[in-house]
Image (cartoon, rainbow, N blue to C red):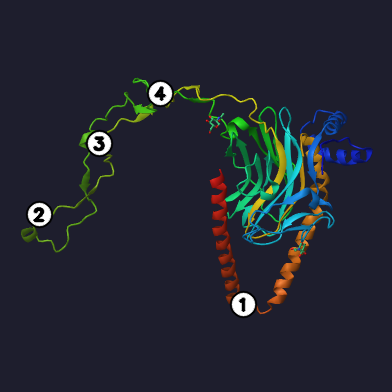
């Protein structure tokens, strides 16, 4: 069981910390590295860690697998593994291992409130299965959750992490539950879509601001007031206001100085075609007097209209003035989750292979940054190399397996892929509707 601890860096951690510093120096060019280092150490030494899970041996004692979907035989098994490609075979996480299954697992930590504290929720996730459609999100739960019954309907405080479906959905979900209702972030936050490990970090601060980081890089930040609809808006358009009758919203008007040129109305619409010739067999007696056919007159410009000029009295488009919204009541505790107690993963997976690792709940973003550098940061390059190696091997084997590969066979393969894709899409629309029902 992980308990809340205070973390002081040991001398051996100094090298790790100073190696993590360069990524921060761009933010503080003018500070000396030394004072930065001091601030950094100070921040980390005061960090409170509420939960930290690296999935070392013994993890099963800390996590409770839910009985959810067990009776229907659709509850999936977790695999304790570093995956098919990794930067360190001994660094294991938990991976979904069966297709078309529901997954629900959770761990408890000493309950806490984030009042007056920064809340940092971070984990890494790797979609080895080349995820077409599905989520890699985690939840923070509060109160008296029965971990054995944890499932899709269990109320949660925060849901956070990547969600991918086809070409249209590739985003980071950040759902906050406020006053019993789930609220989706209104901003589009792109997520990673490859088959490598990425770190997702959600920071909520006591001034009701937030940041979302992917791989220690901030992707979005702002205010809980504006980027979620937790409270009614502070200001609204005055519903009583009316556009004044004399409001001039014409941007252009006819030029009063412009005059119709003399003779303008005498310009004929059509003129005789001067190129036309009387046909040689024209008989004036029989056919009557020959007249040339007419053609459109290039000089004719239609009825005269004065040219338009900018209206010197233009007042712009009328907008109702904004007034204080009588329904808005500020909540200084907007950011507070008073009783956080569990962290859980609850997913439906069409294709399994999503691997979670290095879960962290702390009050100190600097500590989370260092934690990510120490874990994901240390293994990401080797993992990428291992992945590329695995891809190369796969390609070689595929070309070996099918020496007489013809175009026809290729086409069959494509069709098989398509069918699979459709299947996934269908399954996802179930998933989505489930998610949206929840919201
Ligand atoms: C667990 O993962 C490893 C590595 O990918 C794989 O070799 C093994 O077959 C998996 N076990 C199960 C039960 O899925
Ligand atoms: C909380 O929810 C209740 C019931 O839905 C509602 O009446 C109330 O206005 C909500 N309060 C806030 C601050 O949103």
The location of residue 428, given as percent across then percent down, is: 57, 55
Report the residue at 28% width, 44% height from top: 298
The location of residue 279, given as percent across then percent down, is: 17, 60
Q: Nearer the viewer, residue 173 or 114?
A: 114
Spatial CA distance of label 4 from label 1 is 70 Å
Spatial CA distance of label 1 from label 3 is 69 Å
Q: Which residue is mark 2?
A: 289
Of marks 2 and 4, the one in the foreground? 4
Sequence order check, earlier mark of 2 and 4: 2
Sequence order check, earlier mark of 3 and 2: 2
Answer whether labels 2 and 4 touch (C-beta < 8 Å): no
- Looking at the rendered image, the quarter that the C terminus falls into is top right
Quarter-wise, where is residue 219 in the image?
top right
The location of residue 58, given as percent across then percent down, is: 83, 52
Within 10 angstroms of label 2, few (less than 14), some, or many (20 or more) residues? few
Which element is circle 4 on? Answer: loop
């Amino acid at each position: 069981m992980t308990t809340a601890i205070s973390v002081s860096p040991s001398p051996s951690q100094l090298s790790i910390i100073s190696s993590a510093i360069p990524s921060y120096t761009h933010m503080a060019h003018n500070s000396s590295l030394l004072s930065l280092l001091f601030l950094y150490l100070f921040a980390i030494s005061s960090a409170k860690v509420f939960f930290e899970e690296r999935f070392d041996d013994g993890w099963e004692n800390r996590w409770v697998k839910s009985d959810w979907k067990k009776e229907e035989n659709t509850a999936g098994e977790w695999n304790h593994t570093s995956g098919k490609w990794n930067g360190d075979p001994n660094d294991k996480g938990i991976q979904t291992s069966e297709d078309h299954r529901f997954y629900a697992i959770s761990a408890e930590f000493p309950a806490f409130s984030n009042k007056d504290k920064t809340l940092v929720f971070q984990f890494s996730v790797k979609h080895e299965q080349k995820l077409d459609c599905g989520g890699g999100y985690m939840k923070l739960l509060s109160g008296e959750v029965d971990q054995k019954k944890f499932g899709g309907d269990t109320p949660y405080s925060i849901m956070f992490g990547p969600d991918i479906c086809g070409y249209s959905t590739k985003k980071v979900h950040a759902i906050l539950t406020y006053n019993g209702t789930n609220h989706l972030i209104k901003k589009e936050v792109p997520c990673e879509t490859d088959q490598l490990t990425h770190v997702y970090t959600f920071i909520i601060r006591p001034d009701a601001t937030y940041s979302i980081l992917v791989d220690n890089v901030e992707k979005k930040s702002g205010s809980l007031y504006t980027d979620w609809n937790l409270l009614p808006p502070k200001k609204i358009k005055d519903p009583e206001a009316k556009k004044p009758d004399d409001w001039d919203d014409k941007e252009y008007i006819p030029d009063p100085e412009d005059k119709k040129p003399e003779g303008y109305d005498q310009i004929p619409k059509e003129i005789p075609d001067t190129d036309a010739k009387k046909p040689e067999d024209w008989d004036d007696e029989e056919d009557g007097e020959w007249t040339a056919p007419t053609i459109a007159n290039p000089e004719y410009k239609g009825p005269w209209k004065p040219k338009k000029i900018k209206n010197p009295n233009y007042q712009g488009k009328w907008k109702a003035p904004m007034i204080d919204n009588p329904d808005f009541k500020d909540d200084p505790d907007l950011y507070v989750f008073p009783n956080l107690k569990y962290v859980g993963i609850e997913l439906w997976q069409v294709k399994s292979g999503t691997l979670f690792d290095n879960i962290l709940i702390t009050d100190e973003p600097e500590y989370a940054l260092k934690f990510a550098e120490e874990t994901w940061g240390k293994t990401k390059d080797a993992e990428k190399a291992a992945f590329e190696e695995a891809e190369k091997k796969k390609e070689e084997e595929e070309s070996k397996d099918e020496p007489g590969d013809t175009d026809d066979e290729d086409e069959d393969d494509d069709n098989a892929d398509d069918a699979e894709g459709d299947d996934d899409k269908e399954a996802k629309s179930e998933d989505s509707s489930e998610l949206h029902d929840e919201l």
